[in-house]
Image: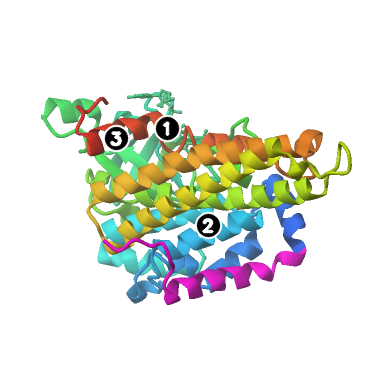
């Protein structure tokens, strides 16, 4: 296997392209960051990213995409986060697009993918329910056929950026768990993927009491006989599990890339401050090992996490089997979630009291980075998976 210690010429070009794109926003970097903390959607940045072809990176050229692969969105995610601005819909839309690429009918691909590639459809993702949690197979949101459409009833929670999305990819049951058990069908049977406009009658969005995590709001999304046309189903009825699981590794890879970028942003702030701030004698605090050693440790963890993230992305783009890519993707996400918390913590410590000044914009990262130990998959579940897949230990869940 070729390991990616150095980037190839094409990859360097893509990364330079991202940097150039972001340099156009450099004079407004601080303003964009403050807008993100107010949870305003970065429309101008979204359009620039789509114009540069990144929203079509997972989409074949035949459907209006650029087919650049996930590695290009890894660069995008890392560089945006290092710049200090990002939004979860970049990754969620790419992940949902992949579900369509891998699972949808030809007709649906032609209708949806060019729109997504052009940046005209932003997509959120809704699987979590109060009584199901980590165990997706326990979800109970039901979709019942009614002529040429389906009626959805149930409730999702923690749905990120449902207010900014043009559509939400909703995982619902078309065969209940009870019926699956009664018919001896596998537990993955009966899930169906729907794309639903959140403005549809019967859909209610209720904001949850969260902070400015990732620059987006989270919602309880309630479906009360909400009508979705059958043509908005990705793939086959009852067969949504496979396209769904194919899209989960990319989500983990892109989260890891974002955290590597946030770490870069933290190191920039911490090191600039440590070089200038003087407290005792005439020495900057950055000359104290108590300050510089932990920052050097952050740097070591960041480089290791970046390599693991690139390894996972390479495995995905090369088309390795799902379980193998899953191992690297989960390792990258696990390493990254520890890195993110450590990096923010050490940056706050370096800044002293200023670390808590919202104007400086580090303290707001705390919740966002801590989230990734819990979501989109908890680190305990990652260890369960890795113990089974890499150590041959019995499945524990
Ligand atoms: C800010 C935020 C944004 C989110 N955005 C979205 C979104 O856009 N779309 C969406 O669908 N969901 C979203 N989620 C939901 C998120 O994916 C879930 O919170 C996460 O998967 C954990 O599920 P849970 O909260 O139900 O925890 P639970 O499943 O109840 O788990 C609780 C604890 O028990 C542990 N645990 C459970 N089972 C095991 C086991 N077998 N072995 C060891 N430990 C175990 C877990 O690791 C965890 O620590 C979001 C959540 C948050 C907080």
Badge 1 element: loop
From the image, tell me which residue sits under label 3: 385
Q: Residues within 10 Å of mark 2 (few under 14, many from 20)?
A: many
Residue 358 within the magenta-colored segment of the rendering: no
Q: Is residue 303 visible?
A: yes
Q: Residues within 10 Å of mark 1 (few under 14, many from 20)?
A: some
Q: Identify the coloring.
A: rainbow
Task: Answer with mark 1 or mark 3, whichever residue precedes in sequence.
Answer: 1
From the image, tell me which residue sits under label 1: 378
- Residue 392 picture quarter: top left
Q: Nearer the viewer, residue 226 or 266?
A: 266
Do callouts 2 and 3 mark residues in contact (Cβ within 8 Å)?
Answer: no
Residue 11 within the magenta-colored segment of the rendering: yes
User: Where on the image, by quarter, is ligand 1?
Assistant: top left
User: Left of 38 or right of it: where is 119?
Assistant: left
Write the residue at 22% across / 28% down. Answer: 395
Separation of marks 1 and 2 at Cα, in angstroms: 21 Å
Question: How far across and how far down the image is residue 167, in percent?
Answer: 47, 52
Separation of marks 2 and 3 at Cα, in angstroms: 25 Å
From the image, tell me which residue sits under label 2: 77
User: Left of 94 or right of it: where is 160?
Assistant: right
- Residue 287 picture quarter: top right
Ligand 1 within 8 Å of the CB at mark 1: yes
């Amino acid at each position: 296997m070729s390991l990616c210690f150095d980037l190839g010429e094409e990859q360097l070009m893509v990364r330079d392209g991202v940097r150039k794109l972001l340099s156009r926003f450099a004079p407004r970097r601080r303003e964009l960051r403050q807008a993100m903390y107010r949870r305003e959607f970065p429309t101008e940045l979204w359009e620039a990213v789509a114009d540069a072809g990144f929203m079509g990176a997972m989409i074949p050229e035949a459907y209006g995409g650029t087919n650049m692969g996930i590695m290009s969105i890894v660069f995008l995610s890392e560089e945006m986060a290092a710049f200090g601005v990002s939004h979860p819909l970049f990754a969620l839309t790419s992940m949902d697009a992949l579900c369509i690429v891998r699972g949808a009918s030809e007709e649906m691909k032609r209708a949806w993918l060019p729109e997504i590639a052009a940046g005209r459809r932003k997509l959120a993702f809704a699987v979590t329910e109060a009584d199901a949690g980590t165990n997706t197979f326990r979800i109970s949101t039901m979709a019942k056929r009614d002529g040429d459409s389906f009626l959805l009833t149930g409730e999702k929670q923690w749905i990120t950026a449902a207010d900014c999305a043009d559509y939400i990819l909703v995982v619902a049951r078309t065969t209940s768990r009870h019926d699956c058990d009664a018919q001896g069908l596998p537990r993955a049977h009966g899930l169906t993927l729907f794309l639903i406009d959140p403005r549809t009658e019967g859909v209610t969005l209720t904001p949850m009491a969260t902070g400015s995590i990732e620059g987006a709001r989270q919602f309880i999304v309630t479906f009360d006989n909400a009508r979705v046309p059958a043509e908005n189903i990705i793939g086959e009825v009852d067969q949504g599990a496979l396209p769904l699981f194919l899209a989960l590794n990319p989500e983990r890879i892109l989260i890891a890339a974002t955290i590597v970028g946030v770490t870069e942003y933290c190191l920039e702030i911490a090191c600039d401050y440590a070089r200038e701030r003087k407290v005792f004698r005439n020495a900057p605090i950055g000359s104290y090992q108590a300050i510089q050693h932990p920052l050097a440790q952050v740097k070591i963890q960041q480089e290791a996490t970046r390599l693991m993230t690139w390894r996972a992305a390479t495995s995905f783009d090369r088309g390795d089997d799902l379980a193998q890519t899953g191992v690297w993707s989960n390792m990258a996400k696990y390493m990254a979630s520890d890195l993110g918390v450590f990096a923010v913590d050490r940056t706050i410590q370096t800044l002293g009291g200023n670390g808590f000044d919202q104007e400086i914009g580090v303290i707001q990262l705390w919740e966002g980075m801590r989230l990734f130990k819990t979501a989109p998959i908890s680190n305990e579940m990652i260890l369960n998976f890795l113990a089974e897949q890499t150590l041959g230990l019995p499945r524990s869940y």
